[in-house]
Amino acid sequence: MINQLNKIEPREMMTYKTKNKIDSMDYQSMLELWRFAEIGHPYFTGEIGDYFSQSMSLKKRELELVKVPVSQCIQEVLDYIQYSEMEGKVDLTDSWYTTYQSLQELQEKVLDEEEMS
């Protein structure tokens, strides 16, 4: 990076503190930093940048290995409909009720399949 005097600024070296800080970040925090940090941020250049990139890739792969049961995902949608669209209780007259009911049926089928596997 070149400063206003056209001199090359030294790159920061990896320190134990920097390594621990990167290691303590979760993937979401790394993505936010990647998106919102200023150009030339030390976490994206040199030795630190290489380590950050490797760490971010590893954390992404770890997330991809986590398998969330489909029934759990359906339950989250059911909860959303109940608490956000139906104001906390299942309302048979609400326009969302048919969707809610269909998701309950799907969840029953999925639970049966999950129990078999």
Image (spheres, rainbow, N blue to C red):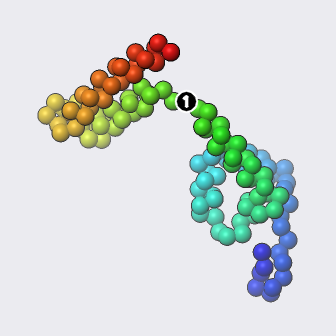
Asked if 92 appears above or below 110 in the picture, the reply is below
Q: Quadrant of residue 61?
A: top right
Q: Secondary structure at mark 1?
A: loop
Q: Amino acid at mark 1?
A: Lys
Q: Counting other residues with Cα less than 10 Å from the Cα at mark 1, is it few (<14), some (14-19), or many (20 or more)?
A: few
Horizontal and vertical percent position of residue 18: 79, 53
Asked if 3 appears above or below 110 in the picture, the reply is below
Q: How many numbered marks does the figure carry?
A: 1
Horizontal and vertical percent position of residue 55: 73, 47
Q: Which residue corresponds to the image point at 21% horizontal and 32% vertical from the top-left?
A: 98
Residue 89 visible (yes or no) = no
On-image quarter of the N terminus: bottom right
Q: Give the side of residue 116 with respect to residue 17, left or right.
A: left
Q: Which residue corresponds to the image point at 34% horizontal and 37% vertical from the top-left?
A: 80
Horizontal and vertical percent position of residue 11: 83, 67
Q: Give the side of residue 7 with respect to residue 85, left or right.
A: right
Residue identified by numbered label 1: 67
Q: Which residue corresponds to the image point at 23% horizontal and 30% vertical from the top-left?
A: 90
Residue lying at the far bottom of the rendered structure: 5
Q: Quadrant of residue 44?
A: bottom right
Asked if 91 appears above or below 51 in the picture, the reply is above
Residue 78 visible (yes or no) = yes
Residue lying at the far left of the rendered structure: 93
Horizontal and vertical percent position of residue 50: 78, 55
Residue nearest the observer in this picture, 54 or 86: 54
